[in-house]
Image: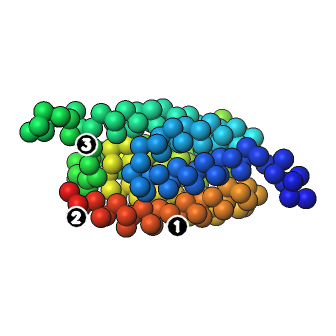
Amino acid sequence: MISDFITDNYIEIFGALTGIIYVFLEIRQNIWLWPVGIATSAAYIWIFLNSGFYADMSLQGYYLIISIVGWYWWLKGTGRENHMNTEKKLQVSHIQLKTGIILAIIWLVLIFAMYQVLTKLTDSPVPVWDSFITSLSIIATWMLARKIYEHWYLWIIVNFVSSFIFILKGLYPTTVLYIIYGIMSIAGLFEWRKSFTHN
């Protein structure tokens, strides 16, 4: 019975395992989170395609791109030199008011546009929640790539809402993954907070 479940769901199990590793590396601010994120996204493109979560599937394509960009930003640092003529490492920072306003506007535009697409062009079973989760995830991932501390608040919302939606859809390994994500997001919030006392 267990072997049959693993055989039938091996891609989803792989995605769940690499997803957990991804968040663990994210909490530790380890740059290897980005290549692990690429592997996770590739698995979930397939999973969401077959489950009818089209916005989430598209989100994984975005994750592939932002993972490459984030990897570059984390490697490159700020692009500004310090007093030792070496590039400054990208540090955890609080979101600026202007950036927050811009991201909020982008989020509203994204959620409206995605809802229109999902209701008119797809058979998504949950267009409102799919749009909400996807648009908020796009913003949170960009903030992660820039090491903006408040991205953890967005992930907490996304992960717990997602776990509720996925359990209704019968994606049980993914539901467990997102519950773990939610718990780890809370842990990440407290862990990244320590960066402000160390800087």
Which mark is first along the chain, 3 or 1? 3
The residue at which mark 1 appears reads as 183
Q: Position of residue 90 (x, y in %)?
A: 27, 44
As shown in the figure, which amino acid type bears the numbered disc 1?
Ile
Q: Quadrant of residue 28?
A: bottom left
Please indicate, yes or no, whether residue 95 appears anywhere in the rendered image.
no
The residue labelled by disc 3 is 89
The one nearer the camera, 172 or 110, is 172
Disc 2: CA contacts within 10 A as few (<14), some (14-19) or many (>=20) = few
148 left or right of 171?
left
**Mark 3 nearby-residue class (10 Å; few <14, some 14–19, many ≥20):** some
State whether residue 85 is above or below residue 184: above
**x and y percentages locating residue 124 in the rendered image:** 69, 45
Q: Are marks 1 and 3 in contact (CB under 8 Å)?
A: no
Quadrant of res 45: top right
Question: Which residue corresponds to the image point at 47% horizontal and 62% vertical from the top-left?
Answer: 185
Looking at the rendered structure, the secondary structure element under dot 3 is loop
